[in-house]
């Protein structure tokens, strides 16, 4: 099989992994070396595919042959997809060739499980080792690791990689047992705990005064959760994500909407991807991370799913109208962060500006605050919302998006206008 | 009305601005003219050089940072805007002006600064090198790229490429200015026409294969793509010509997937590792 055909198969096999981040690595560059590569700045998206996803890394599998039978995955052993396998040298050369032409930030290498977890990990690590040691490559390397691989191998992967990840796949063991019978939540979390320990150990070594510089180790780990394949609620997903962020200090939990694949399984019939749901989940997570919401405020036992029509913060505000209006000139930062339509950056601008003058609506307009959204929730020097505005039942109606014409083809992707605004698949 | 003739560089503006400031000329009495521009209808006196000998006015460090970025902006009104800010900070009693984000001038300057930074970021992203050969003496590979930035950012964007591609020789050619790295020295030469740059690279076929294969037709979001990769960049991206056909085919590809008959589950093969996993999950076995 020629290289072109292998690339076709093994990139196609890798595209269901949503991760593409190339940020958050330690600062390093190629000055004074014979190699190429730099990391440590902001991540760069070198291209975009028409699915709106950033192309930042050469994201491929070493092989798509696989012993596992995860029913949502095109590479499961029951699939009839054509199988291919790169040699480590082919991946090394492809990475360097793409990198030198400035197509990519680096490599994201994953693999189907062949022979055993350890054997597979060894192959993946060998690619990274060659890039770093034989070719002095200082670009970004993200390695997918396998929870069942021996801790020593996962550690070795971490020495060559900037980022390592383990996919949690589904928020509950029930879901895994049905859809990914070889995977296990407890084992995955145990491996994440081990990686967290190693990352923190290295950080501590680095901070020791007068100690020699410790050998490099990945600066972060991430994971991916599939959305829409099983019956999990948004509450299940957000709570699992929250537990992963706090328990294992993950850099990122990616949500990957279950999307139609060729070769679907009887166990899991395919359906159009839940793009809006994925978007709302990212917004829900952002609300928790940046705006200091508790997950239990965003999704409640009565409403375990996020409102698809409105963003989670606006939904929360509509359920908690007694907390408003907030006075732009007096309210503390935490209260301003909860005003629908105000993001972190504008809240900080407002705080800076109100030290110099009392703010009026014109000031907010200049900051490009979405006026229609904020007006019912704020007081400024020249504005107080009418009581009716906050109490009226029509307030929710006002924020619903206009009815959209149905797409003619029902089996095509669903309309995604609401989706376009701020979702960055992966990159938040 | 005073006409300030300057070269389109920060140094030239700074020199002129110092003179004007020392003479107490308010911003609305100055017409800024970049060298090469036609003299304005409001032709008026220019200051005799040399500049007045007076201490340079003190400005916050943040202002000079801002000015350095803004100087690269393509809008020639930037010089007047910068001078107005400078005047307000030094003569208008508004030393903290830059920390008032709701001020109209600060807002505008912030938007322009963002526009320049974004263009630098996009240059880092969308430059595409093409291999032209190998230096016989040093053995280093040589690459050349063609790029058409919207602002005058070549000097601001180049250090990134130096850090990243130290181990190869490269040139980035643009219509305004070109940057070159030979392993020792980063240097700049005047702009060249597009025809000076190579028109292909053998690897582009593989890159296009990758672009095509990594695209998921079931998640078409064209607007999202264009927001981050506006069409103005497409003409210099080897992968961009594929975009229309990928979009056009996506509907049929998804329909085909949905029409595919679902596959039965195959029995697990004999494998010691799978066996060990099963024993871990069910210790009674």
Image (cartoon, rainbow, N blue to C red):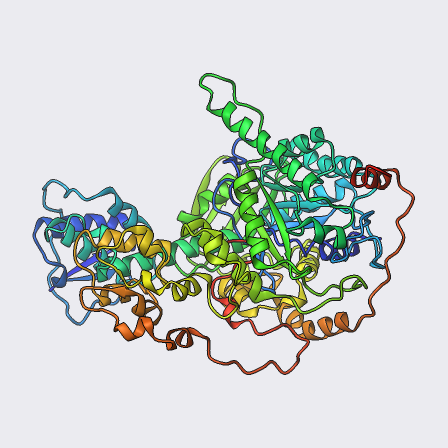
- In the rendered image, the residue lying farthest to the left is B24
- In the rendered image, the residue lying farthest to the top is A210
Residue nearest the viewer, comparing A381 with B91: A381
The N terminus of chain B: image quadrant: bottom left
Residue A90 point in image, percent of width and height? 75, 44
- In the rendered image, the residue lying farthest to the front is A302
The C terminus of chain B: image quadrant: top right
Q: Is residue A65 left or right of residue A222?
A: right
Residue B211 point in image, percent of width and height? 66, 59
Corner quadrant of residue B213:
bottom right
Is residue A38 in view? no
Residue A264 point in image, percent of width and height? 78, 64
* Residue in view at x 68 percent, y 62 percent: B212
* Residue in view at x 76 percent, y 62 percent: A268
Q: Is residue A285 left or right of residue A369?
A: right
Q: Is residue B4 left or right of residue B156?
A: left
Is residue A343 in view? yes
């Amino acid at each position: 099989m020629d290289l072109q055909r292998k690339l076709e198969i093994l990139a196609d096999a890798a595209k269901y992994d949503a991760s593409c981040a190339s940020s958050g690595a330690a600062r390093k560059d190629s000055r004074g070396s014979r190699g190429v590569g730099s990391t440590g700045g902001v991540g760069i998206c070198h291209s975009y595919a028409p699915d709106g996803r950033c192309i930042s890394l050469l994201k491929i599998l070493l092989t798509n042959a696989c012993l596992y039978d995860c029913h949502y995955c095109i590479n499961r052993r029951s699939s009839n997809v054509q199988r291919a396998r790169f040699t480590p040298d082919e991946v090394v050369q492809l990475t360097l060739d793409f990198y030198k032409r400035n197509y990519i930030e680096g490599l994201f290498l994953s693999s189907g499980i062949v022979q055993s977890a350890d054997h597979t990990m060894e192959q993946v690590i060998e690619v990274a080792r060659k890039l770093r040691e034989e070719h002095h490559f200082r670009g970004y390397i993200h390695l997918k690791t396998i929870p069942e691989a021996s801790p020593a191998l996962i550690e070795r992967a971490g020495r060559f990689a900037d980022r390592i990840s383990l996919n949690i796949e589904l928020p509950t063991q029930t879901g895994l047992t049905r859809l990914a019978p070889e995977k296990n939540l407890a084992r995955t979390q145990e491996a994440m705990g081990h990686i967290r320990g190693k990352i923190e150990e290295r950080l501590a070594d680095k901070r020791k005064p007068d100690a020699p510089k410790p050998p490099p180790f990945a600066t972060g780990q991430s994971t991916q959760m599939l959305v829409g394949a099983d019956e999990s609620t948004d509450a299940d997903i957000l709570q699992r994500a929250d537990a992963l962020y706090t328990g294992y200090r993950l850099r990122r939990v990616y949500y990957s909407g279950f999307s139609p694949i060729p070769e679907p399984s009887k166990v899991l019939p395919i359906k159009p991807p839940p793009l809006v749901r994925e978007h709302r989940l990212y917004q829900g997570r952002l609300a928790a991370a940046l705006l200091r919401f508790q997950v239990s405020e965003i999704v409640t036992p009565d409403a375990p799913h996020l409102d698809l029509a409105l963003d989670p913060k606006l939904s929360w505000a509509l359920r908690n109208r007694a907390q408003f209006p907030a006075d732009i000139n007096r309210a503390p930062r935490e209260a301003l962060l909860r005003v629908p339509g105000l993001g972190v950056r504008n809240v900080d601008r407002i705080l800076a500006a109100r030290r110099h003058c009392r703010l009026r609506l014109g000031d907010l307009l200049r900051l490009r605050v979405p006026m229609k959204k904020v007006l019912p929730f704020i007081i400024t020097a020249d504005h107080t919302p009418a009581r009716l505005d906050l109490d009226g039942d029509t307030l929710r109606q006002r924020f619903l998006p206009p009815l959209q014409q149905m797409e003619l083809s029902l089996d095509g992707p669903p309309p995604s206008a609401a989706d376009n605004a701020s979702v960055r698949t992966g990159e938040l | 009305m005073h006409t300030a003739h300057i070269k389109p560089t920060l140094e030239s503006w700074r020199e002129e601005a110092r003179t004007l400031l020392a003479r107490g000329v308010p911003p609305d009495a100055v017409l800024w003219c970049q060298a090469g521009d036609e003299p304005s209808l409001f032709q008026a006196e220019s200051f005799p050089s040399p500049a007045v000998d007076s201490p340079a006015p003190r400005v916050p460090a943040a202002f000079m940072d801002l000015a350095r970025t803004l100087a690269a902006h393509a809008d020639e009104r930037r010089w007047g805007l910068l001078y107005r800010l400078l005047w307000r900070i030094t003569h208008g009693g508004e030393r903290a002006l830059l920390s008032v984000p709701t001020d109209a001038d600060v807002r505008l300057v912030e938007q322009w600064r963002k526009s320049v930074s974004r263009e630098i970021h996009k240059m880092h992203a969308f430059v595409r090198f093409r291999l032209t050969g190998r230096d016989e003496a040093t053995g280093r590979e040589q690459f050349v790229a063609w790029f058409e930035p919207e602002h005058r950012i070549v000097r601001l964007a180049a250090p990134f490429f130096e850090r990243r591609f130290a181990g190869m020789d490269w040139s980035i050619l643009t219509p305004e200015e070109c940057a070159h790295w030979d392993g020792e020295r980063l240097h700049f030469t005047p702009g060249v026409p597009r025809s000076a740059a190579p028109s292909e690279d053998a690897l582009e076929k593989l890159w296009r294969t990758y672009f095509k294969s990594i695209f998921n037709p079931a998640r078409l979001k064209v607007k999202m793509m264009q927001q981050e990769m506006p069409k103005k960049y497409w003409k210099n991206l080897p992968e961009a010509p594929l975009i229309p056909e990928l979009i056009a085919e996506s509907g049929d590809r998804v329909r085909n997937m949905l029409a595919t008959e679902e596959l039965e589950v195959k029995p697990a093969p004999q494998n010691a590792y799978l066996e060990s996993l099963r024993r871990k999950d069910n210790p009674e076995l």
